[in-house]
């Protein structure tokens, strides 16, 4: 009996434990079920919010696009109105006695919002080079660059400067500019980086003048000695690749450096774009460059008035008078011949006068 009682108690214990375990598992399953339901609900709300945000983003983008179009249409409308006024002024030109009122803005050179219009290439005056360079306008380049060879570092007023040459169109231009920094550029061709010095230059495009940074790179074999990148274009200009040299040349009488192709074409046609410049430089060099005169004597040039003051003062001190203009021997000979001819003419006239006087005396006698 005792054994049966123990067995019965053990059986009851296991049954109760099993029942309790079953009850505990059911509670956990219920909790997991509720938790999964909560998570699903949260995910549903998040998806709903994402959809709402996506809709708002789309609406904002559409609104911005619509606003952008409206602004462009308004700008175009203003431009058309201004152009109408400009055309009306031109139409009234004759009635104003041939005088034309200058418009406030030329829309061939500027946009309605005041930005410059640049072509695929433009004339850029570089003050440090004292030359105008036909530059390529490249919106794909982040930085501007200028051709530089034989770069030498030196110090001026305690600051670092760079001296370099621009070699283009069979000319070499010496340039000195303040050093700014060294920049690192990634080169896909060599799968690495290249380092370039950066200088600050003063430039002028049309009526716009500014000081800008330029990378130094040897562009001797490239089409253009100067490249204008986005650092100079942002917020001040728009580019029309269908046009060239939109802005007027700032320095019309100065040295001009053009692209290699244009230079070769002009050379084949016998055209020298710097002919007037070279002639002017040669003329202005009188009295500044020591050369032998045509008669192999020391000379100040063709015109002593263009001599350096120190040279003029020295000669005036030594000779007691200012230097005189040297004459070409050939020209001098021609002048002497003319004088001799005049003397001969006078002699013949004198002879004729003597004969007349003799004849008059004979007639009287």
Image (cartoon, rainbow, N blue to C red):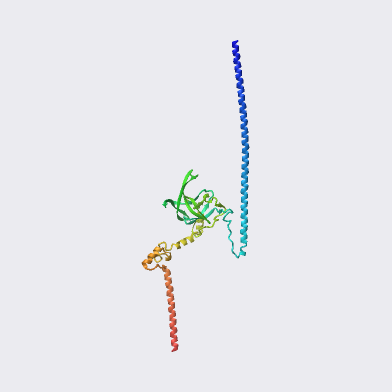
Q: Does 3 sit above or below residue 146?
A: above
Q: Where residue 336 appears, x then y in whole percent? A: 42, 72
> At x 61% / y 50%, what residue is drawn?
71
Q: Position of residue 179 (x, y in %)?
A: 45, 50
**Residue in front for this viewpoint, 267 or 335:** 335
Q: Nearer the viewer, residue 142 or 7?
A: 7
x, y (%) of residue 12? 61, 16
Question: Visible in this render: residue 16?
Answer: yes
Q: In this image, 6 relative to 198: left or right?
A: right
> Can you name the residue that lies furthest to the top here?
1
Residue that protrudes farthest toward the left in the picture? 318
Report whether 277 appears left or right of 94. left
Residue 48 occupies which quadrant of the picture? top right
Q: Is residue 97 above or below residue 141?
A: below
Tell me the quarter of the image containing the N terminus: top right
Point 62% across, 54% down: residue: 78
Q: How many marks?
A: 0
């Amino acid at each position: 009996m005792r054994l049966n009682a123990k067995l019965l108690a053990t059986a009851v214990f296991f049954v109760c434990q099993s029942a309790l375990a079953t009850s505990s598992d059911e509670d956990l399953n219920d909790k997991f079920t509720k938790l999964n339901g909560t998570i699903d609900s949260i995910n549903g709300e998040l998806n709903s919010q994402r959809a709402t945000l996506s809709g708002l983003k789309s609406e904002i983008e559409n609104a911005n696009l619509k606003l952008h179009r409206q602004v462009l249409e308004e700008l175009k409308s203003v431009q058309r109105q201004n152009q109408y006024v400009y055309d009306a002024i031109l139409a009234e030109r004759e009635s104003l006695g041939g005088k034309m009122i200058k418009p406030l803005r030329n829309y061939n050179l500027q946009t309605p919002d005041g930005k410059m219009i640049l072509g695929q290439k433009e004339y850029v005056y570089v003050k440090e080079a004292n030359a105008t360079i036909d530059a390529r306008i490249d919106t794909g380049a982040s930085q501007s660059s200028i051709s530089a060879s034989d770069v030498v570092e030196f110090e001026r007023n305690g600051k670092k400067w760079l001296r370099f040459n621009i070699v283009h169109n069979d000319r070499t231009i010496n340039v000195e500019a303040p050093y700014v920094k060294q920049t690192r550029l990634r080169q896909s061709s060599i799968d690495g980086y290249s380092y370039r010095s950066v200088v600050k230059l003063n430039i002028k495009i049309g009526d716009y003048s500014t000081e800008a940074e330029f990378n130094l790179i040897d562009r001797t074999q490239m089409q253009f000695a100067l490249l204008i990148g986005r650092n100079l274009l942002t917020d001040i200009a728009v580019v029309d690749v269908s046009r060239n040299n939109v802005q007027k040349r700032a320095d019309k009488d100065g040295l001009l450096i053009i692209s290699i192709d244009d230079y070769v074409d002009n050379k084949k046609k016998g055209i020298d774009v710097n002919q007037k410049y070279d002639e002017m430089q040669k003329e202005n060099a009188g009295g500044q460059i020591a050369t032998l005169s045509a008669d192999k004597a020391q000379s100040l040039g063709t015109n002593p008035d263009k001599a350096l003051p120190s040279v003029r003062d020295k000669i005036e001190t030594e000779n007691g008078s200012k230097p005189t203009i040297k004459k070409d021997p050939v020209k001098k000979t021609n002048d002497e011949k003319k004088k001799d001819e005049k003397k001969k003419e006078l002699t013949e006239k004198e002879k004729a006068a003597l004969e007349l006087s003799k004849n008059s005396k004979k007639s009287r006698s």
